[in-house]
Image (cartoon, coloured by chain):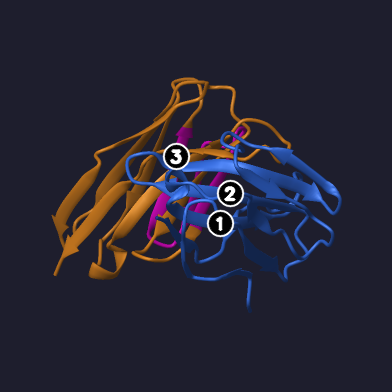
Amino acid sequence: KQEVTQIPAALSVPEGENLVLNCSFTDSAIYNLQWFRQDPGKGLTSLLLIQSSQREQTSGRLNASLDKSSGRSTLYIAASQPGDSATYLCAVKRGGGADGLTFGKGTHLIIQP
Amino acid sequence: NAGVTQTPKFQVLKTGQSMTLQCAQDMNHEYMSWYRQDPGMGLRLIHYSVGAGITDQGEVPNGYNVSRSTTEDFPLRLLSAAPSQTSVYFCASSRKPGQDEKLFFGSGTQLSVL
């Protein structure tokens, strides 16, 4: 059974710092990996999706990498801002069907002004 | 841009009551799914659908029922509510593989079963 682990569970950094969030998964046979952002009391917003054949994806100040063979992904946030404060979740998809994602428990990020 | 719309946002039930959580999307997505989010557990898949008339079970389907009569709607029914079903429920949709498969979520339904 696929398990997804996110480290650290919580992180607090001053504004302006670059930071890295980590995600690991136990079964490297994945179809894709997504990083999501969740604000308190709200739903999830997809930030980046990496297909299993890709190594990384970038969107603005966000960069996500994927090393499928080692079962790891990182989300890099450049020049952090207070508005980046949220919980970030990593999720992997096993196959090309609709059988859903396996989620990590998330990293709760606080950016101090 | 409505996206994925869930109703209600909050609900309190007594043990044994039944209810339906509504979910609708206006993006013409083929895939729709229901997740529950519990503290310390992460999100877990309840049921999913690949299109109208087709549904299947996820990781935690017991106590829930779904149907998909149209592409837009995917309601989740609690047959006889139990305290263990106290959770936040999220509906999600996406395109099918081969297209942009980003998952779009509704804003959630917070359910308490007393």
Q: Residue at x 16, y 53 (%)?
A: A12
The lab-note entry on whether marks 3 and 2 share a chain reads: no
Is A28 magenta? The answer is: no
Q: Nearer the viewer, residue A108 or A32?
A: A108
Query: Under tag 1, what secondary structure?
Result: loop
Q: Nearer the viewer, residue A43 or B53?
A: B53
Residue A8: image x %, image y %?
Answer: 24, 39
Query: Under tag 2, what secondary structure?
Result: loop
Crowding near the residue tagged with mark 3, few <14, some 14–19, many ≥20 C-alpha atoms within 10 Å = many
The type of residue carrying mark 2 is: Ser
Reading the image, the residue beneath label 2 is B80
Residue closest to the far bottom: B1
Query: Under tag 3, what secondary structure?
Result: strand
Mark with earlier residue (2, 1): 1
Crowding near the residue tagged with mark 2, few <14, some 14–19, many ≥20 C-alpha atoms within 10 Å = some
Q: Residue at x 63, y 45 (%)?
A: B64
The numbered mark at residue B17 is 1
Residue B70: image x %, image y %?
Answer: 84, 62
The type of residue carrying mark 1 is: Gln
Residue A71: image x %, image y %?
Answer: 45, 24
Q: Are discs 2 and 1 less than 8 Å apart at CB?
A: yes
Task: Kindly report which numbered mark, 3 or 1, lies closer to the viewer in this rendering.
Answer: 1
**Region rendered in magenta:** A46-66
Q: Residue at x 73, y 37 (%)?
A: A97
The type of residue carrying mark 3 is: Ser
